[in-house]
Every structure is written in C-alpha cells, then in structure tokens.
C-alpha cells in the first residue's frame, strides 16, 4: 500500500510502498483511510524533534488526524459495522496500564509509556489501510464526512475547554484565544457556541481570510492585547512568551491553558498571579469522551464555520506539505481514497 513513511535512519520522508497492516484480530477492524489532516506535531516528527518508529523498525508512517471507513470486522466486534465512518483515537494505553489508562483516560497517562499513532511508536494513518481495535475508534455520522477530519483537533479543544471551565472558580465570560490556526479557530468556535465573548489574537492582518471568517461569525479579532480582558486564555499559537504576556490582561480567577507553547525562558508575573488567583495549566491529547464531544460540537456548527478551514491535497504531496505548509491554508488535509 502507499504510505507517507519517515525513515529515522536515512532521515528521509517520502510516500513509498509499505507492507499492509497485519491481519485483523479479535476485536479489531480493518480500515480504509479516506483522508488525514496534518499539523505542527507532524512537522515536529518529520524534523526529528520528537517521535519514534515502532519498536524494531526504522520507519514510521505519519498522520494522526484520520478519517476512515470500516472495511472488515475481526471476530467479536460488536459496536461497528462495515461501511461505518470512524475517527481513531491517537494514543494507546501505556504498557503497565496505569490507573488513568485503565479507566479510559490514557490522555492523562501517569507513566508516560503510552504510544501514539503516527507520533510515538505506532504507525499512523497517512496510508491506504490500517487495523485498530474497535475501542479505539469513534463512530462518526455520515453527514459529517466532509468535516470529520476536524474531529481529532476538535477533541484536543474539548479537553482544554472542559479543563478551563473546571479550573475557573467563578463565572467566566470572556475568552481570549492566542493563535488563528486550526486549534485556535476551533477553540474560538467552541467558546462562542457556549455563549462566551471571544477574542482571537493572531499576527495575520485583520483583512486576512481567517480573521474575516472569525469576525463574520461573531468573534472579535485583534493583533495586540490592548483593550482585551479575559477570564480564560487558550494558547494555540506556540509562543510561551505571548501566553505569559497575555496574563497581564487576565482577570481575577483567570485560567490560562497552554496547548502548543514551545519551550522558552519566560518570566512569570508571579506576584500578579498570586494576587489574581490565576491558574496556569496545560493540556495534551484527548479521551474517547472528548472525541464524542467533538463530534457533537462539529455537528452543531454551521458548516460555513468549518469548510473554509480545509484545503485538500493528494497523498502524493504529503512529504512536501508537512515540512512546508502552503501559507494561506488553515488545515491541510491529504486525500487518500474516495
Ligand atoms: C495530538 C495529540 C498528541 C500530541 C503529542 C498532538 O498533535 O493532537 O493527540 O498527544 O500531538 O504527541
């Protein structure tokens, strides 16, 4: 089958021929991949910043934002049927099966010995076929086919949003999202659909397509922190410095959630944080429950909020776009089959 394979020995990323996944075992299903989105994590893996091939192999198939159709069922599969549209979870339980993994919260794994499809130790989904356990697959209604590739990033947002609301001890109303990439825009839609006042801060000019998309749909857009006040800040821009700077507009009891800030030396405004009862937290990955919330949330949105985010290209171009994403597109999605 075709696969976007990162070779950790030859240090090469290319679409190449790859062995099909092993036979479908008990409880497993065989998937035919429809499409797979790419993100900054894929870039980090492709540039060997993090990530690892499966044990005993030198190559890793990339891709973790997948949409697939169930093609065949192994014995004992009860929840899924052939032809069902699904989105796979990214993370798989840690070896010892810690207290979090064994109660369905592998996104909060305690040991760090988990594996992640397309990232750490397991092949991903930028390929024709995959095999997964039915418990790792989230059913998606067919009506969501054209935007289902956003379920995985939206699940990351759902987890962060749930955390922010749980941590804030008061009555938050204003949300500031840092960054207008896919996670930032999905976070803005999520907070907006929950009735919050939302501001997105990003570097693109106000007449850029993504700023206009936000503004048209009731989100305030800014390139500076001037005049902004926030109860919740969702960092989705990669900048620790900006996340910390945003704390100067954080109201009392405010919560900042880091999602993508790169390691950096920053100076925390600890006195203001203490006096303001501020909470600085971080979040990664998502559980089955968050994937289900993401499916429901995406269903509730007007498609005009989502369709402009997606830019589809053939699988053959994946090696190029992961490393050099075309500028204006918000989310690059590689088509694998129809
Ligand atoms: C994925 C998460 C994953 C994280 C770190 C993100 O892009 O959405 O599921 O846990 O990368 O590997």
Image (cartoon, rainbow, N blue to C red):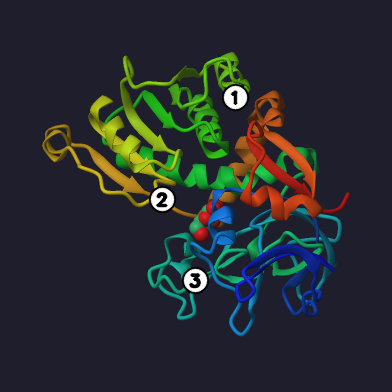
In the picture provided, is 193 more to the left or to the right than 233?
A: right
Disc 3, SS: loop
CB-based contact (under 8 Å), mark 3 and mark 2: no
Label 1 to label 3: alpha-carbon separation:
35 Å
Residue 267 or residue 168, whichever sits in front:
267
Pointer 1 residue: 210
Instruction: Give the mark nearer the N terminus: 1 vs 3.
Output: 3
In the picture provided, is 127 more to the left or to the right than 110?
A: right
Query: Which image quadrant is residue 42 in?
Result: bottom right
Instruction: Give the mark nearer the N terminus: 3 vs 2.
Output: 3
Residue 242 or residue 131, whichever sits in front:
242
Residue 45 or residue 174, whichever sits in front:
45
In the picture provided, is 151 more to the left or to the right than 251?
A: right
Disc 1, SS: helix
Label 3 to label 2: alpha-carbon separation:
16 Å
Residue 215 locus on image (x, y percent):
55, 16
Pointer 3 residue: 114
Residue 334 locus on image (x, y percent):
75, 48
Query: Which residue shows up at 77% across the image and 50% down it?
Result: 317
Residue 184 locus on image (x, y percent):
51, 34
Pointer 2 residue: 283
Quarter containing the N terminus: bottom right
- The answer to whether one can see residue 111 in this image is yes
Residue 169 or residue 13, whichever sits in front:
13
């Amino acid at each position: 089958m075709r696969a976007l394979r990162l070779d950790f020995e030859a240090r090469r990323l290319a679409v190449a021929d790859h062995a099909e996944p092993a036979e479908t075992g008990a409880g497993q299903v065989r998937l035919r991949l429809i499409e797979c989105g790419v993100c900054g994590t894929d870039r980090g893996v492709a540039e060997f910043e993090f990530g690892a091939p499966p044990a005993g192999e030198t190559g890793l198939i990339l891709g973790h934002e997948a949409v697939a159709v169930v093609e065949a069922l192994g014995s004992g599969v009860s929840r899924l049927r052939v032809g069902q549209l699904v989105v796979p979870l990214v993370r798989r339980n840690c070896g010892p099966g810690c207290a979090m993994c064994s109660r369905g919260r592998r996104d909060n794994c305690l040991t760090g010995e988990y594996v992640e499809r397309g990232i750490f130790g397991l092949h991903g989904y930028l390929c024709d076929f995959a095999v997964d356990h039915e418990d790792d697959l989230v059913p998606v209604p067919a009506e969501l086919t054209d935007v289902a590739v956003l379920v995985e990033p939206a699940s990351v947002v759902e987890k962060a949003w749930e955390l922010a609301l749980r941590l804030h001890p008061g009555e938050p109303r204003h949300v500031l999202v840092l960054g207008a990439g896919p996670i930032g825009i999905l976070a803005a839609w999520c907070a907006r659909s929950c009735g919050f006042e939302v501001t997105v801060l990003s570097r693109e000019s106000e007449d850029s397509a993504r700023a206009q998309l936000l503004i048209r749909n009731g989100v305030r857009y800014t390139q500076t922190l001037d005049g902004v006040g926030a109860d919740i800040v969702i960092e989705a821009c990669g900048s620790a410095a900006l996340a910390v700077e945003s704390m100067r507009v954080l109201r009392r009891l405010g919560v900042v959630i880091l999602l993508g800030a790169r390691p950096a030396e920053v100076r925390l405004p600890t006195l203001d944080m203490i006096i303001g009862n501020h909470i600085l937290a971080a979040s990664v990955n998502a559980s089955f429950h968050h994937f289900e919330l993401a499916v429901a949330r995406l269903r509730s949105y007007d498609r005009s909020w989502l369709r402009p985010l997606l830019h589809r290209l053939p699988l053959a171009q994946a090696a190029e776009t992961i490393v050099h994403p075309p500028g204006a597109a918000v989310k690059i999605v590689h088509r694998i089959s129809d």
